[in-house]
Image: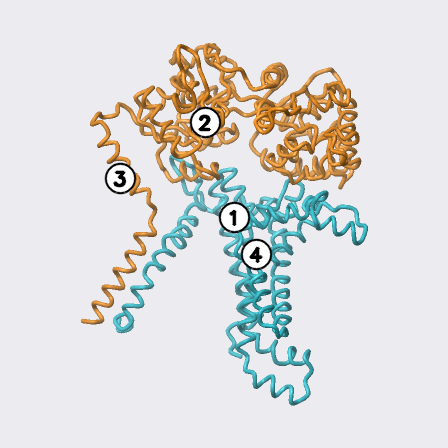
Chain colours: A orange, B cyan
């Protein structure tokens, strides 16, 4: 009897351990359902479950307010889940496990191709063509849709925002202080970067500034433009080529090696992540980085917030002109929504997609939540302290819709940067096999740029490996 | 049945652990094996394709390159990860001051508790060519020009090996010290009476008595050596990836980044088989089952 009760107690104890080890998602779902049921007694018209990388509130509390605002504006009962990290893995897990979401935010066209190939994404062609909002060229320019079409011309996604491009961003105040002009050719770039290194532009009496910093090959397009070389694949007469692996790239890698040898380029460029690169720029350690158009404004704004009297001025400049005078710049892969094949509320998802590209959706995605991030009175918008902190970015810092004007001016420098993107930036082509090709290109390009290997040898080895792995045709 | 009745309480207490391993260990293993034989798509049909995924991995030159890197880096970690804690344990054993011994053990063990993200970030900073203390000391003491340890392929491998050794030697060191402490003191007395020097005490008393612990540590390290991932993921960069990307990086790349889930699953089973072969070989070579 004693033994039986002992076994029973032990089993109960063991069982309680198991129960407490289980996730609490079941509990919270029950809580949410109870909350919803007790709320107003009104049945929600539509429901949505969204997985988002950038869209939404900055904190869990603000996310709840964001969801409530969507419900107020659309009548849709929305749950937005925004993982703190490992977003790619989360998306893969969600789709692979059959978990049901109505909308998922992505920002990689290569991944979109893979998902389409895996049968995981709904064809939205008919919906987009039939939507008076989305098919309006003033809302989304017709040519832009080509980015989201597959090889059969079907549309599988809808934009979340307008994605800009990357370019060289320079310390304009340092240029002015050293009486330098904005560089246009590669030689002029060299002179400017050398001056940033040697002439103490931050005026602290120490030899602690670099001319240029990057994060690996991210993003040297602004300089490779001088030799007319576009990153990733370029199709030539139906053949796959990678210009960064061509002989024309040799003098470019030698140019970078010279910068590294002379101490003009930050030697940590190989191991830098973009955060470190940004910090170097913000802390007067480097005079030029290569980054997004939106960040021109953010750099200026961040320094201004720290010190209203600062002379810091970041400005975007065009890439180095090529031999034919052409300028190559990188247009970033767009951010977009997909509707998974197993989405249970497709109608609600489509309604949301139209809303997201309308004035109300754009205002929510940019300024944020009314009376939380901003107030509005008689057409006059005022940002709250929280709204200023959020930088008018809740997933939509910029948008396509020409009918929607921002009530605030863009941050300093952004307008000019976006003009450069409009004039010169083009998308990069990533074909299947690009992840393997990129490893080879980056490996040898970085060795050549850091001077570890002669550029000619690096390019030769690059091409040999790419050919033997059948990743290029010539 | 009699044993279950007799030890029922203990079996009941073990139940959560067993269930945990079934759910989080054996079920994923079985499912992974199933996926490795499928043309696995995120949604829709997942037809069985026999050994096609295994063939794809076998014929992929990147897989063999990753295997080569794993052998070099894993082998280095195995050797250094065995010798370093043993030397430190033997050295600490000679220290008489108790507080110093305990403090040293604590300091040695701390890196083992930290995650690779923290350790990796720290070493990236320490090894930086312009502001890192390692290069500053090398330059000051020996006039050596800055070395970009993490950007040069040869150095990067050594960094992986030595940082892994440094991170985990505290754990093995404590196992060795515990074993040393349990050695019968009369053996040392007898050896001293025979005129043994300190080195002879170590060589003829301590080391033979540690054989059992050494076997366990070698086997434990061998089990994990083909599965190294965290330190490579944190410390790698495109410049060194061809020399440091290991088998688990290949599996991660194929399965997660490229969403070739079937191929990734097949690669992971190659790792399983190689680990099994390696473990059996080590058990045989070390005569693991022999009683001393």
Disc 2 vs disc 3: which is toward the camera? Answer: 2
* Residue that badge 2 annotates: A386
Q: Measured from the top left, where is residue B77 in percent x and y?
A: 61, 58
Label located before the other in sequence (2 or 3):
3
Residue in front for this viewpoint, B121 or A328: B121
Element on which disc 3 rests: helix
Indicate which disc residue B247 carries.
none
Furthest-bottom residue in this view: B193
* Residue that badge 4 annotates: B111
* Residue that badge 3 annotates: A30
| Residue at point 60%, 84% (across, down) | B188
Give the spatial CA distance, label 1 vs label 4. Answer: 31 Å
Q: Is disc 4 in contact with disc 3, using a CB cutoff of under 8 Å?
A: no
Element on which disc 2 rests: helix
Furthest-left residue in this view: A1
* Residue that badge 1 annotates: B267
């Amino acid at each position: 009897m004693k033994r039986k009760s002992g076994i029973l107690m032990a089993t109960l104890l063991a069982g309680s351990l198991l129960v407490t080890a289980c996730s609490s998602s079941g509990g919270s779902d029950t809580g949410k359902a109870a909350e919803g049921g007790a709320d107003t007694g009104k049945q929600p018209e539509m429901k949505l479950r969204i997985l988002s990388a950038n869209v939404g509130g900055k904190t869990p509390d603000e996310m709840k307010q964001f969801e409530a605002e969507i419900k107020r504006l659309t009548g849709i009962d929305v749950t937005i889940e925004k993982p703190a990290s490992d977003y790619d893995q989360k998306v893969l897990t969600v789709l692979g496990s059959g978990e049901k979401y109505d909308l998922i935010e992505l920002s990689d066209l290569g991944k979109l191709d893979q998902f389409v190939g895996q049968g995981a994404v709904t064809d939205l062609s008919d919906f987009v063509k039939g939507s008076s909002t989305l098919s309006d060229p003033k809302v989304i320019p017709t040519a832009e849709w080509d980015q989201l079409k597959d090889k059969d011309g079907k549309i599988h996604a809808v934009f979340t925002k307008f994605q800009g491009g990357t370019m060289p961003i320079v310390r304009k105040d340092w240029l002015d202080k050293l009486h330098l002009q904005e560089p246009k050719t590669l030689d002029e770039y060299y002179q400017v970067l050398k001056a940033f290194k040697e002439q103490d532009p931050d005026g602290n009496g120490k030899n602690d500034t670099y001319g240029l910093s990057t994060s690996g090959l991210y993003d040297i397009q602004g300089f490779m433009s001088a030799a007319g070389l576009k990153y990733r694949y370029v199709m030539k007469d139906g053949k796959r080529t990678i210009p960064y692996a061509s002989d024309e790239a040799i003098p470019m890698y030698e140019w970078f090696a010279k910068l590294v040898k002379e101490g003009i380029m930050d030697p940590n460029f190989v191991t830098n992540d973009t955060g470190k690169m940004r910090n170097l720029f913000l802390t007067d350690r480097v005079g030029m980085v290569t980054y997004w158009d939106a960040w021109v404004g953010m750099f200026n704004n961040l320094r201004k917030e720290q010190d209203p009297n600062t002379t810091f001025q970041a400005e975007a400049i065009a890439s180095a002109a090529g031999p034919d005078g052409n300028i190559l710049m990188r247009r970033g892969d767009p951010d977009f929504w997909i509707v998974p094949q197993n989405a249970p509320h497709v109608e609600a998802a489509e309604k949301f997609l139209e809303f997201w590209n309308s004035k109300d959706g754009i205002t929510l995605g940019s300024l944020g939540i009314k009376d939380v991030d901003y107030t509005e009175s008689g057409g006059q918008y005022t940002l709250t302290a929280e709204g200023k902190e959020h930088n008018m970015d809740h997933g939509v810092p910029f948008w396509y819709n020409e009918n929607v004007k921002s009530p605030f001016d863009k941050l300093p420098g952004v307008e000019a940067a976006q003009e450069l993107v409009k004039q010169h930036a083009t998308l990069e082509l990533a074909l299947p096999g690009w992840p393997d090709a990129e490893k080879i290109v980056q490996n040898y390009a970085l060795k050549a740029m850091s001077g570890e290997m002669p550029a000619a040898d690096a390019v030769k080895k690059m091409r040999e490996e790419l050919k033997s792995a059948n990743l290029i045709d010539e | 049945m009699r044993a279950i009745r007799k030890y029922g309480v203990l079996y009941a207490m073990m139940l959560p652990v067993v269930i945990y391993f079934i759910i989080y260990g054996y079920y994923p293993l079985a499912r992974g094996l199933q996926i490795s034989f499928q043309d696995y798509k995120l949604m829709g049909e997942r037809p069985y394709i026999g050994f096609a995924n295994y063939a794809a991995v076998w014929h992929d030159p990147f897989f063999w390159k990753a295997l080569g890197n794993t052998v070099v880096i894993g082998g280095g970690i195995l050797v250094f990860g065995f010798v370093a804690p043993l030397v430190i344990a033997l050295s600490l054993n000679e220290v008489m001051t108790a507080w110093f011994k305990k403090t040293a053990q604590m300091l040695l063990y701390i890196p083992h508790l930290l995650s690779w993200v923290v350790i990796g970030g720290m070493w990236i900073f320490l090894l930086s060519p312009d502001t890192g203390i390692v290069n500053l000391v090398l330059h000051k003491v020996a006039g050596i020009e800055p070395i970009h340890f993490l950007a040069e392929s040869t150095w990067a491998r050594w960094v992986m090996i030595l940082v892994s050794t440094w991170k985990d030697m505290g754990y093995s060191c404590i196992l060795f010290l515990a074993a040393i402490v349990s050695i019968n003191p009369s053996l040392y007395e007898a050896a001293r009476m025979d005129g043994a020097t300190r080195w002879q005490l170590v060589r003829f008393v301590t080391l033979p008595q540690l054989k059992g612990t050494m076997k366990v540590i070698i086997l434990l390290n061998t089990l994990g050596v083909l599965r190294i991932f965290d330190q490579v993921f944190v410390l790698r960069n495109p410049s060194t990836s061809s020399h440091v990307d290991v088998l688990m990086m290949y599996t991660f790349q194929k399965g997660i980044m490229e969403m070739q889930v079937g191929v990734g699953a097949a690669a992971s089973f190659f790792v399983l088989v190689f680990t099994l072969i390696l473990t059996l070989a080590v058990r045989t070579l070390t005569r693991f089952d022999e009683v001393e």
